[in-house]
């Protein structure tokens, strides 16, 4: 256990970098409206609806830097997408960290000559500095935006939208707690071992088209262990051939 912790570099409570897996992990909590109350600025004034919110459930995003070159894998519980991490353009006001389409652009975030993926990896492997908090915040926002655009995260309603939806419920009441309406689970990508096992099983269970075709024919043909009348057997065979021909004709 201590060895595992030695491999983890914490940037924030919800953001860590795993040295062994060369992977950035960001936990994104969902902010939900759990209660609507009436508030007024002064006594006797008519109250206005105000939302009370809480963080409930969420999703984990992983940025895997192990692929070769400038490639990386953005991964959530809903799937993964290959993206690029490139050097930002060299210009007087060079971008330190930014996003263009599905590309993360990295400039000289370490105040040296490094840029692109190598700069990001070196940054993540360095002891976190207080002055780096802005870069960390931008990185969080960019990864989140990329995951949303790739449909790797479920759509999130704003607190205001949720407040309006709560007010339309038949059981709505001011001051009532609606925490139980929301999913408390923080969904994370499969662990590496689980992904490897799943991929292996999928490969093992994928028979060739010819083998599948042969198995299907056998299941149709050997419908009985009793002796089959030759005439009936011919009928069964012809029916099978007719069905196969309808699917595809390989006669050339």
Image (cartoon, helix red, strand yellow):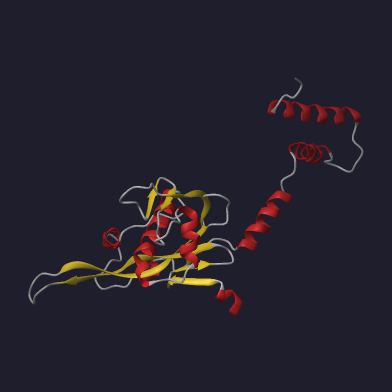
Any part of residue 231 in sight: yes
The relative height of residue 167 versus residue 129 in the rendered view (above or below) is above
| Depth check, front residue: 48 or 155 | 155
Indicate the quadrant containing the N terminus: top left, top right, bottom left or bottom right: bottom right
Residue furthest top as drawn = 252
- The residue depicted at 46 percent of the width and 58 percent of the height is 119
Any part of residue 1 in sight: no
| Depth check, front residue: 57 or 114 | 114
**Image spot of residue 55 (x, y percent):** 37, 69
Indicate the quadrant containing the C terminus: top left, top right, bottom left or bottom right: top right
- The residue depicted at 74 percent of the width and 50 percent of the height is 204
- The residue depicted at 34 percent of the width and 51 percent of the height is 94
The relative height of residue 250 versus residue 79 in the rendered view (above or below) is above
| Depth check, front residue: 57 or 90 | 90
The quarter holding residue 180 reads bottom left
**Image spot of residue 250 (x, y percent):** 74, 24
């Amino acid at each position: 256990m201590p060895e595992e912790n030695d491999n983890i570099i914490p940037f924030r409570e919800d953001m860590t970098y795993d040295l062994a897996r060369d992977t950035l992990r960001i936990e994104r909590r969902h902010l939900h409206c759990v209660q609507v109350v009436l508030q007024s600025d002064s006594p006797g004034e008519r109250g206005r609806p105000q939302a009370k919110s809480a963080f409930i459930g969420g999703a984990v995003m992983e940025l895997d830097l192990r692929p070769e070159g400038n490639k990386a894998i953005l991964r959530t519980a809903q799937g993964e997408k290959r993206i690029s991490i490139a050097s930002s353009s060299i210009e007087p006001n060079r971008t330190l960290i930014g996003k263009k389409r599905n590309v993360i652009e990295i400039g000289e975030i370490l105040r040296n000559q490094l840029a692109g993926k190598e700069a990001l990896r070196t940054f993540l492997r360095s002891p976190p500095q207080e002055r780096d908090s802005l870069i960390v915040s931008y990185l969080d926002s960019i990864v989140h935006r990329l995951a949303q655009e790739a449909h790797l995260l479920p759509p999130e309603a704003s607190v205001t939208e949720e407040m309006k939806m709560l007010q339309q419920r038949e059981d709505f009441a001011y001051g009532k707690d609606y925490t139980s309406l929301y999913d408390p689970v923080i969904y994370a990508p499969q662990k590496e071992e689980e992904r490897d096992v799943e991929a292996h099983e999928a490969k093992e269970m994928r028979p060739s088209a010819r083998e599948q075709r042969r198995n299907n024919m056998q299941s149709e043909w050997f419908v009985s262990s009793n002796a089959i009348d030759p005439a009936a057997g011919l009928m069964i065979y012809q029916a099978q051939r007719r069905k196969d021909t309808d699917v595809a004709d390989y006669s050339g």
